[in-house]
């Protein structure tokens, strides 16, 4: 087995977790490699001895014979590793060093349990759908995809923007708001949720279209099938607007035409036997913790 260990930044208090992971992988004689930028941080912090194989961004992990990716961080780290996974569908196991951990749901106290489960094959793959962005101008380079959400937002003014939305070419609504979100089921517990959007089961095959601070009180989020194409036109008092895919962004003008649809590949998250979506929801949102339930 060969593991690609990914993280965006090495914090001092995360070094013991990294060292524990490496010790366990060495114990089971599992080969591993790092992204070059992360390895340079490890070297600078003197967190490990010797040299390890590194990979430059853009290299094909399949050609490196990587069997699994382990991320060290929070949900944002898993979003960041999408640029490495791309359409390879290499399974991703997230070790949570962040706060919420909807995606990176293996706590750092359970690293040994996680590795032993992977070795024994005691896990399943949770296939998560992605959003693909199409536009009449090049945007987001070779990775116009998002695991969580696509957003259109105001940028240079405090005034509202006007967004015309269409589903499969049919007019849906004109949103007078601060912006709009199209989220996958995975992203439904993120930005969309904070704007009043619904929580969607990962296997639901739906997208949620959620307005951001809509001016009309009768405008509400809507759930649509993920085989639909949702297109947008945006206008406002400012010349520039913000378009995002997860944590990446581009500045666009009102002349840009945008459409989002389901990508033709998915992200495979490693699901250990003891975890499932409802358990994660209860743990992270403290559902069922009301004292009256006892």
Image: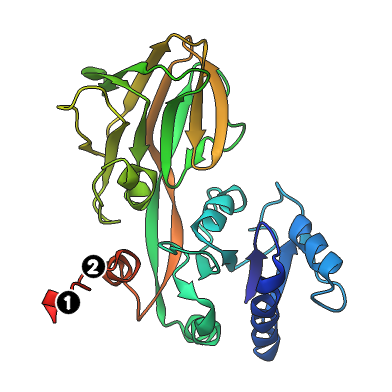
Identify which residue is drawn at 66% across, 72% down: 14
Report the front residue among 291 and 223: 291
How many residues crowd around disc 2 within 10 Å: few (fewer than 14), some, or many (20 or more)? few
Mark whose residue sits in front, 2 or 1 = 1
Q: Looking at this view, is 47 or 200 the one in front? A: 47
Which residue is disc 2 drawn over? 287
Q: Is residue 172 above or below residue 71?
A: above
Marking on residue 291 = 1
> Is residue 236 left or right of 228 when viewed as pictured?
right
| Quadrant position of residue 183 | top left
**Quadrant position of residue 112:** bottom right
Q: Position of residue 172 (x, y in %)?
A: 21, 21
Residue 88 left/right relative to 265: right
Question: How crowded is the residue under tag 1: few (<14 C-alpha within 10 Å), some, or many (20+)?
Answer: few
Is 41 situated above or below 179?
A: below
- What residue sits 18% from the left and 72% below the top? 290
Question: Which residue is rendered at x = 36% and y = 20% of the image?
Answer: 232
Residue 155: x percent and y percent?
51, 22
């Amino acid at each position: 087995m060969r593991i690609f260990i990914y993280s965006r930044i090495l914090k001092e208090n995360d070094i013991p977790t990294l060292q524990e992971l490496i010790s366990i992988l060495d114990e089971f004689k599992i080969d591993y490699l790092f992204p070059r930028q992360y390895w340079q941080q490890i070297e600078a912090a003197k967190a490990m001895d010797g040299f390890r194989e590194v990979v430059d961004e853009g290299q094909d992990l399949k050609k490196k014979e990587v069997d699994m990716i382990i991320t060290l961080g929070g949900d944002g780290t898993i979003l960041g590793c999408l640029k490495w996974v791309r359409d390879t569908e290499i399974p991703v196991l997230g070790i949570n060093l962040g706060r919420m951990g909807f995606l990176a749901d293996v706590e750092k106290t359970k690293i040994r349990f996680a590795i032993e489960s992977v070795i024994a094959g005691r896990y399943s793959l949770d296939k998560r759908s992605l959003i693909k962005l199409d536009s009449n101008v090049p945007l987001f380079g070779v990775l116009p995809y998002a695991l969580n959400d696509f957003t259109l937002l105001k940028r240079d003014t405090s005034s509202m923007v006007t967004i015309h939305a269409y589903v499969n070419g049919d007019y849906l609504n004109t949103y007078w708001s601060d912006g709009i979100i199209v989220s996958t089921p995975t992203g439904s517990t993120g930005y969309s949720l904070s704007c009043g959007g619904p929580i969607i089961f990962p296997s639901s095959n739906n997208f949620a279209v959620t307005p951001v601070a809509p001016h009309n009180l009768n405008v509400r989020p809507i759930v649509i099938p993920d085989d639909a194409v949702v297109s947008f036109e945006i206008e406002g008092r400012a010349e520039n607007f913000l378009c995002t895919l997860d944590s990446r962004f581009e500045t666009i003008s009102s002349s840009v035409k945008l459409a989002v649809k389901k990508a033709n590949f998915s992200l495979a998250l490693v699901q250990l036997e003891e975890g499932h979506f409802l358990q994660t929801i209860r743990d992270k949102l403290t559902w069922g913790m009301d004292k009256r339930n006892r």
